[in-house]
Amino acid sequence: MEFTWLTIVASLSMGIGAVLVFIFAVKRDYFRNLEDAKYQVFWSDVEELVDSRPREEAKNEEQRETHD
């Protein structure tokens, strides 16, 4: 019976802690721009592709020139 009360107290403590962390995050505006993070990740991937493409094309041109 002692173990049951211990687990109940532990689960209530964790639940109250999670609620307090959530309230803290809401008050600090951590959930304000959730969409921006998604687009930042997307655009960084696109920029990497755009930046790497001229290098790959230059390598391909150099290989064509050396084979010709």
Image (cartoon, grey):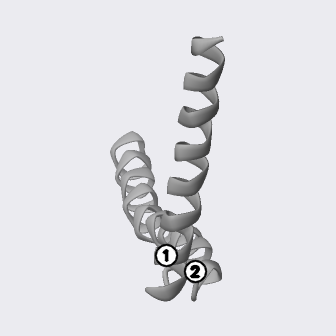
| Position of residue 35 measured from the top left corner of the image (x, y, whole percent) | 65, 80
Q: Nearer the viewer, residue 54 or 33?
A: 33
Q: Amino acid at mark 2?
A: Phe
Q: Nearer the viewer, residue 40 or 60?
A: 40
What is the crowding at mark 2: few (fewer than 14 residues within 10 Å), some, or many (at least 20)?
A: few
Question: Which residue does the image show at 42% across and 61% down from the upper left?
Answer: 52
State how far apart marks 2 and 1 are (Cα): 7 Å
Single out the mark in the foreground, 2 or 1: 1
| Position of residue 37 measured from the top left corner of the image (x, y, whole percent) | 54, 75
Please identify the quarter of the rendering in which residue 51 is found: bottom left
Label 1 sits on a secondary structure element that is helix
Q: Amino acid at mark 1?
A: Ala
**Pointer 2: what residue?**
31
Instruction: Point out the residue furthest to the front here.
Output: 1
Please tell me the numbered disc located at residue 57: none
Position of 52 with respect to 43 (left or right) is left
Q: Is residue 44 above or below residue 27?
A: above
Question: Which residue does the image show at 56% across and 68% down from the upper left?
Answer: 22
Q: Is residue 34 above or below residue 45?
A: below
Visible in this render: residue 45? no
Visible in this render: residue 16? yes
**Pointer 1: what residue?**
25
How many numbered marks, from 0 up?
A: 2
Q: Nearer the viewer, residue 41 or 2?
A: 2
Q: Quadrant of the N terminus?
A: top right
Label 2 sits on a secondary structure element that is loop
Assess whether mark 1 and mark 2 are in contact (beta carbons under 8 angstroms): yes
Q: Is residue 68 above or below residue 4?
A: below
| Position of residue 4 measured from the top left corner of the image (x, y, whole percent) | 66, 18
Position of 28 with respect to 1 (left or right) is left
Q: Earlier in the sequence, mark 2 or mark 1?
A: 1
